[in-house]
Image (cartoon, rainbow, N blue to C red):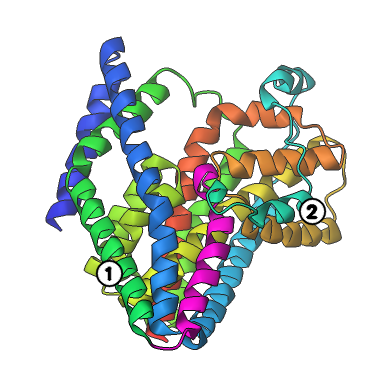
Amino acid sequence: MKRTIWWIGALILGAVLGLLGLHWLDQLMEFVAVVYTRLFQLLAVPTIVLAVITTLATFGSKGSGRIFGRTLTYTLLTTLAAAIVGAVLYVTIAPGNLPAEVVSQGQESAGEAPQLTYYSHIIGLIPNNIIRPFLDGNVLSLLLLAFAVGIGLSRLPESENKAVVVKGLLGLQELLFLLIRWLIWTLPLGIVAFSAQLSAQVSAGVVADSIGKYVLVVLGGNVIQFFVVLPLFLLARGLNPIHVLGRMMPAVLMALFTKSSAATLPVTMDTAEQRLGVRKHIARFVLPICTTINMNGCAAFILVTSLFVMQNGGTPLTLGTILLWILISVISAVGNAGVPMGCYFLTLSLMSGIGAPVAILGVILPIYTIIDMIETAENVWSDSCVAAMVDKE
């Protein structure tokens, strides 16, 4: 509780500093925010790898297979629910088409869609160099490596050599968590910087030109998923949503400001273990996987944005079309690479592939920062719910 109060105080202080409009102060806050983001990204990669390897090596691949199955089931169910909520809201609120001159203004802002097919994406996940995935921060490739090493260690016969390797990995993991706790202890300074940076952007008019009903659908869907759908999943498993959210609030707040569930992972794991009481072998196995594939906010964004772009391009939004894009959005979100603005560029690629007017994405771009923040917070909250539900089994 004390830590949460500190974080909220830092949030308010940062908002006030950002509204002052001092150029040197804005630059300082941006520097501090970038430093904290980079430090958490630095810790995120070894956290993912060591957590999966040590869990598989010590807990056993058989038990982990059952946990993975439950994790995947809850991930697909919550992601599908997010997409359905987005579709229902879109049909209910019914955003209109944008004026032609607004669309033309967004042409240059939209950018070019990355030339990446699903074939090349899947091939890219298979590492041909043990160092390259670490250098690139390719989380899915790292998970494949971690699964292979962890399952291999679990299948090795008990020997002194195996014990030395496992103890060494566990020792590295404990050292890593010590560093994470140190970083979390200093985090109020980072929260001040993140909040000041956001406040300065808002006061400068970055989010002033919204596009009304579309934004209402996207943010409304996230709010319903966050406060209604995910709590219903928890209640169905006999868990108190208020208790779970209260305990996981530090991780959710961290996700809001970093806009990266991977960078938030060290905080999510520490919070789940220390505050929520999730068993270590569950938290350290489920949360790295969820960080990679559990993208509730991304699924909703892909669906709503795709429907909005296609509608503006003259495509009739029939029930069949909406159902098809619900499926596409869920599959795309689960397979989405964990890169900055990954959902935005994935949507851009999908729309380019069907010849839709991607210039509309240029209109959306100025407000994507706010959307991305809320989506990431929702993703981490969903990760926390999945971990809590798997731990309840």
Does residue 342 appear left or right of residue 122 in this picture?
left
State the predominant SS element of the stretch in magenta: helix
Q: Residue at x 33, y 49 (%)?
A: 253
92 left or right of 148 in image: right
Q: Quadrant of residue 355?
A: top right
The residue range painted magenta reads: 134-158
Q: Quadrant of residue 187?
A: top left
Q: Nearer the viewer, residue 258 or 21?
A: 258
Q: Circle 1 — which element?
A: helix
The tag earlier along the polypeptide, 1 or 2, is: 2
User: Which is more toward the observer, 8 or 218?
Assistant: 8
Q: Quadrant of the N terminus?
A: bottom left
Disc 1 residue type (three-letter): Glu
Task: Tell me the crowding category of disc 1: few under 14, some 14 to 19, or many 20 or more residues within 10 angstroms, Cα based.
Answer: some
Tell me the amino acid under the disc marked 2. Answer: Tyr
Above/below status of 292 relative to 366:
below
Residue bearing the label numbered 1: 273
Q: Is residue 19 magenta?
A: no
Mark identifier at residue 119? 2
Count neighbours of disc 2 (C-alpha within 10 A) and say few if under 14, some if 14 to 19, many if 20 or more. few
Q: Quadrant of the C terminus?
A: bottom left
